Image: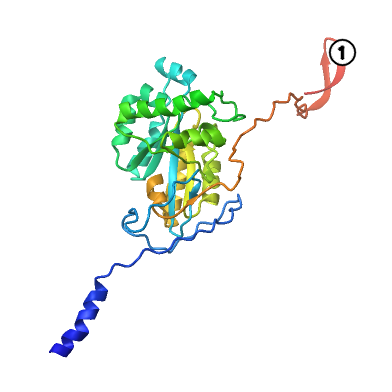
Amino acid sequence: MRRELLFLLPALMLASVPLSPPVARTTIPSPVPPSLVMEADVSLELSPAIGLPTTGDPPPVPRVVLGVTTARPLVALTFDLDMTPSMAAAARAGFQWINTDGTSYLEASNVHATLFMTGMWAEVYPSEARRLAANPNFEIANHSYSHPAFHSPCYRLASVSRGAQLSQVQMAQQAIQRATGMTPRYFRFPGGCYDRQALDIVHAAGLIPVEWNVNSVDAFNAYPQQIAATVLSLVKPGSIVVMHLVRANAPATAAALRLIIPALERRGYQFVTVSELLAAGPAIQPTDPREVVEAPVMPLVARRLPAAAPRWCGWVTGFRGRVYTCR
C-alpha cells in the first residue's frame, strides 16, 4: 500500500500544475497581397475566453498599435464615429448621422467590436452613446473631439495647433465620460494621420494610439461587395479592421457587414475588442523611424470628357433642305 502511494503522489502533483501559455510569435508577418482570396477554414481551436496574462511582467506600452502577432484566428472590427462642427450643425437641424442599421446588425450578431467615438458625437447623441456603451460586447475609445487632422496633409481635414491637439484629446475624454460613464483607454487619430509630437501628446494623456492594418475603404463607398472583398482579402489572425458607422459618409457599411461577418465566421474567426486582441499577443507596430503618417490629396484636374459616339448617322430633310447628320 505504501509503495502505491509513493507512485500516486507525484502523478497527482503533476496534474495540479497549470500549463504555461504558448509563446507568441514575435515576427511581423509579411503583407498580404490585395487580391481576393478563397475562403478557407481555420482549424485552430479557440479557448472559451480571452483573458489577460496572469503571470510575468506586463508588456511595455506600444507606441502605436496596428494589429497583433498571433496564430489564433482573432480579428478586431473597429468603427469610427466621426463628427465635425458642420456635421453637428446638420444633426441639430434634423439630419441623421447614426448608422442604426449597422449597429443593430452588430448587436444581433453578438459581435465584439471597438467604437472610436468623437466627443462631439457623444454630445450630439448622448442617449445612443450611453446605449452602445452599456453593451458588454462593445468597447468605447477616443477619436478626438471634433475630428481635425493631427498632422497635415490628411485628406481634406482641417488641422489644429499642438495645444489644441491636447484639448481635442481631453475634451473628447470628458464628453465620452459624461455621456457613457466610460473612460476610454485607446485613441485613434482622425484620418489615421500623426507625427511624433502628436504621438507624444496622446501618450502623455494616458491613451494608447490604435490604427489598423486592414482598411475596409468603406468611407464614401457605395459598393458593399467591394468593401467586403477588400476586407476578406486582407484579414489574417491578429488584424485590426477600420470601418465607419456614419450613415451618409459610409453608406454601404451595414450591407458590407452582412457579407464580411458570416464569411469570417465560416473561416473560423472570432471577433474581439482591441483590449481582447492585445491580450492575445504582442502588438504589431510601425517600423518607420520618422513616426509620420500623412495622406496627401491629389489635386483635381479639369479635363474634357470624350464626346459620346453617335448612335445613328444618315440623311435628314429639314427647313434647310436635305443634310447628312449624326445623332
Horizontal side of residue 91 vs 285, given as left or right: left
Viewer-closest of 314 and 298: 298
User: What's the residue type where badge 1 is placed?
Assistant: Gly
In percent of width and height, residue 147 lies at 49, 27
Q: Where is residue 204 drawn, in percent x and y?
A: 44, 35
Q: Does the image show residue 228?
A: yes
Q: Is residue 74 left or right of residue 323?
A: left
Vertical order, 303 against 33 (above or below): above
Residue under label 1: 321
- The number of callouts visible is 1
Which quadrant holds the N terminus? bottom left
Callout 1 secondary element: strand
Q: Tell me the quarter of the picture where residue 113 sits.
A: top left
Q: Give the residue drawn at x 38%, y 29%.
A: 173
**What is the residue that sits farthest to the left in this orientation?**
1
Crowding at mark 1 (Cα within 10 Å: few <14, some 14-19, many 20+): few
Residue 273 appears in the figure: no
Image position of 324 with respect to 34: above or below? above
- In screen coordinates, is 130 left or right of 304? left
Residue at 75 percent of width and 26 percent of height: 305
- Considering the image in quadrants, where does the C terminus appear? top right
